[in-house]
Image (cartoon, rainbow, N blue to C red):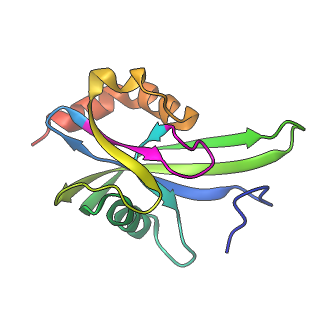
Amino acid sequence: MVKRRYPDQPVVGIGAVILHEGKILLAKRGNQPAKGEWSIPGGAVEVGESLEEAVLRETREETGLEAAEPELLDVVDQAHRDAEGKVEYHYVIIDYAVKVKGEAKAASDADELRWVPLDEVEAYVLTPSFRRFFVKNRKKIETLNSVP
């Protein structure tokens, strides 16, 4: 198992951008780092798993939704240092848009799920990496949201 806290190298993670009727599905993080902050569903890639398999699995585990057709959007990273300046967490996160079926229900390490209108996302307490991703990719996300 990859050591997440005080890692020897960055941990590879994925994020799922799930859109529906002008809203994006946000997950309130249930674990550190960033416990209590909002982001998109996602998690770490498991050994032997493709990135696409990981985003489909993580979507199912965190939301109960069956995901399909992952489309690469962007890659972001986030390093968090402790009070002594040591790297406590370091993630490289690969974000995909996915299409989903089913009803969203918080599971796994998501404390809560919420469908948020795109124009309200930045008012939430977001993880730093998701805030950067959203600001950088907002136009792309809005375009994806308008596609049936």
Determine the residue positioned at 76% across, 58% down: 9
Above or below residue 129? Residue 5 is below
Q: Position of residue 103 (x, y in %)?
A: 18, 57
6 or 73: nearer the eye? 6
Determine the residue positioned at 24% across, 54% down: 104
Q: Position of residue 127 (x, y in %)?
A: 53, 36
Q: How many numbered circles does the render carry?
A: 0
Q: Position of residue 48 (x, y in %)?
A: 53, 79
Residue extending furthest bottom? Answer: 48
Give left or right: position of 96 versus 12: left
Toward which corner of the image does residue 3 lie, by quadrant?
A: bottom right
Q: Position of residue 138 (x, y in %)?
A: 35, 27
Determine the residue positioned at 77% across, 58% down: 7
Residue 136 drawn in magenta: no
Numbered range of the magenta stretch = 24-37
Image quarter in which the C terminus is found: top left
Residue 26 drawn in magenta: yes
Image quarter in which the N terminus is found: bottom right
Toward which corner of the image does residue 25 lie, by quadrant?
A: top left
